[in-house]
């Protein structure tokens, strides 16, 4: 059964229950009110009749005193004395008591019988005089009109309830149809995406953005967006990896061809093969590391690392690389200790300083600093080199992303993996890495790491 049908049925049933309860209440109230009116009228008639009823000189009820009593059209009465009926109201020729039990009740009683078919509401009033005679006055109220009113009321209420349920069902069917329409579209688009493998499609939001359906569509569209970007990056990644693998393999294959052709191995060929194998090994190592980092499986050998010592080591190592071409200096160094994987942190620093040196012009300056700032250590690597174009900035931490200028392959050019690896390493240390750069002015890479909380004093 469809959700639309289920909601419609549920809504109609709820409306039906409420209306039936309301109808029963209205019917009972009206019935009680009418009965009350009848009883009041009976009591008034009884009082008027008793007022005119006299006792004759034979100590009997004097029927003549009430002979001219004319009650309302729908009221009849009987006067009983000595177990026989003394007087009945015109035109009723009924000699049986209007209410058998009321006759012997010995007190004023209304027949509470209000069942269908009973056409009279009867009031029995015992008659007693000080001088002896006793009897009963029974007054009946013809309920035909009231019963008709009740029947009409019941039919009107039933019809109204049925009509209201029909309208409620129709309204619920239309409203749920309209409300669920976007879900139908979501289902169709999802099916289309699965069938056609088309992640570019989005679901249009026709209604308000912030209601339940709008939020669902938004969430669905965001999921599609994420899936599309993952899919694309997966595709790009595969293309990049195959591209990066092909070049060294072609070089190696070419060199082997030369060896085979000339039947001799010269040092230059061997060096070239060696360099390409090194590049391949680096690429595979980087990919493995990145894979581990991105799946959260990067195992860090955590220990206490003195960042100042580490920075000095990196400085010494990179000074050789910078040589005379670039001036490398440490402008500030605090003593800071963090908990981390020393080799991985060194890898990050080598990459950042390596890039800074690589993208510096001859005579450029690369400044390193390590500062303790509240609960974190801040390392800054700053150069005054080529800078990074604004359009490249948001992407440089992506895998295989290389700026326009770095895309031409040179023996020492990287694969565009260094910064994404650095990003993941720092992320796995609960730290952060940021970049500020301006084209032709230089770049500033800022790494921050949380400092060990001090050991508790015992
Ligand atoms: P690569 O191995 O190509 O250097 P990275 O991931 O380390 O890969 O860097 C990605 C890209 O970011 C580089 O190709 C380069 O365009 C840009 N980049 C990184 N560091 C710097 C820097 N200090 N100055 C200018 N550009 C930089």
Image (cartoon, rainbow, N blue to C red):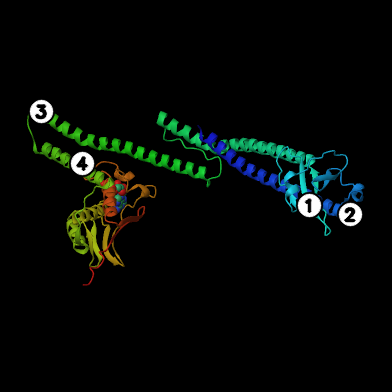
Asked whether the beta carbons under mark 4 and mark 1 sit within 8 Å of each other, the answer is no
Residue at the extreme left of the image, as rendered? 264
Instruction: Give the residue displayed 74% in from the left and 41% down from the top.
Output: 150
Reading the image, the residue beneath label 4 is 284
Gap between marks 3 and 4 measured at Cα: 28 Å
Gap between marks 4 and 1 measured at Cα: 113 Å
Reading the image, the residue beneath label 1 is 125
In which quadrant of the rendered view does residue 224 lie? top left
Observer-side mark, 3 or 1, equals 1
| Residue 361 in view, yes or no | no
Q: Callout 4 environment at 10 Å: few (<14), some (14 to 19), or many (20+)?
A: some
Residue 131 left/right relative to 323 = right
Q: Earlier in the sequence, mark 2 or mark 4?
A: 2
* Secondary structure state at the residue bearing disc 2: strand
Q: Position of residue 296 (x, y in %)?
A: 27, 48
Reading the image, the residue beneath label 3 is 260
Reading the image, the residue beneath label 2 is 54
Gap between marks 3 and 1 measured at Cα: 137 Å
Residue 228 left/right relative to 129 = left
Observer-side mark, 3 or 4, equals 4
Depth order, front residue of 212/331: 212
Q: Which mark is residue 110?
A: none
Gap between marks 2 and 3 measured at Cα: 151 Å
């Amino acid at each position: 059964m469809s959700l639309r049908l289920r909601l419609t049925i549920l809504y109609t049933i709820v409306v039906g229950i409420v209306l039936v309860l309301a109808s029963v209440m209205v019917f009972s109230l009206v019935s009680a009110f009418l009965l009350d009116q009848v009883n009041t009228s009976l009591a008034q008639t009884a009082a008027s009749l008793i007022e005119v009823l006299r006792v004759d000189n034979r100590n009997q009820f004097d029927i003549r005193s009430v002979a001219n009593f004319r009650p309302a059209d729908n009221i009849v009465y009987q006067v009983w004395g000595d177990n026989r009926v003394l007087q009945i109201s015109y035109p009723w020729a009924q000699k049986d008591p209007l209410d058998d039990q009321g006759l012997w009740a010995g007190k004023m009683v209304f027949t509470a019988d209000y069942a269908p078919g009973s056409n009279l509401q009867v009031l029995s009033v015992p008659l007693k005089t000080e001088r002896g005679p006793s009897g009963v006055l029974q007054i009946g109220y013809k309920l035909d009109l009231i019963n008709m009113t009740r029947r009409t009321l019941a039919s009107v209420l039933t019809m109204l309830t049925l009509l209201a349920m029909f309208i409620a069902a129709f309204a619920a069917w239309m409203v749920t149809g309209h409300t669920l329409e976007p879900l139908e579209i979501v289902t169709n688009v999802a099916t289309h995406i699965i069938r056609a493998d088309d992640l570019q499609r989005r679901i249009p939001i026709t209604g308000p953005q912030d209601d339940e359906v709008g939020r669902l569509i938004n969430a669905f569209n965001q999921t599609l967006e994420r899936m599309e970007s993952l899919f694309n990056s997966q595709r790009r990644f595969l293309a990049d990896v195959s591209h990066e693998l092909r070049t060294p393999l072609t070089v190696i294959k070419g060199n082997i061809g030369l060896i085979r052709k000339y039947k001799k191995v010269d040092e230059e060929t061997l060096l070239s093969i060696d360099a390409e194998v090194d590049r391949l090994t680096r690429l595979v190592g980087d990919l493995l590391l990145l894979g581990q980092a991105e799946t959260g499986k990067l195992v860090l050998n955590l220990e206490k690392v003195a960042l100042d010592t580490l920075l000095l080591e990196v400085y010494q190592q990179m000074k050789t690389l910078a040589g005379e071409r670039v001036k490398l200096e440490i402008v500030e160094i605090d003593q800071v200790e963090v908990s981390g994987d020393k080799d991985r942190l060194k890898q990050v620093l080598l990459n950042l300083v390596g890039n800074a040196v690589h993208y510096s012009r001859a005579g450029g300056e690369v400044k390193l600093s390590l500062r303790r700032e509240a609960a974190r250590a801040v390392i800054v690597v700053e150069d005054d080199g080529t800078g990074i174009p604004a359009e490249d900035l948001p992407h440089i931490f992506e895998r295989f992303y290389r700026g326009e200028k770095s895309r031409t392959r040179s023996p020492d050019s990287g694969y565009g993996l260094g910064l994404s690896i650095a990003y993941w390493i720092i992320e796995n240390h609960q730290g952060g890495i940021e970049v500020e750069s301006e084209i032709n002015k230089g770049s500033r890479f800022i790494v921050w790491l949380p400092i060990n909380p001090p050991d508790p004093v015992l």
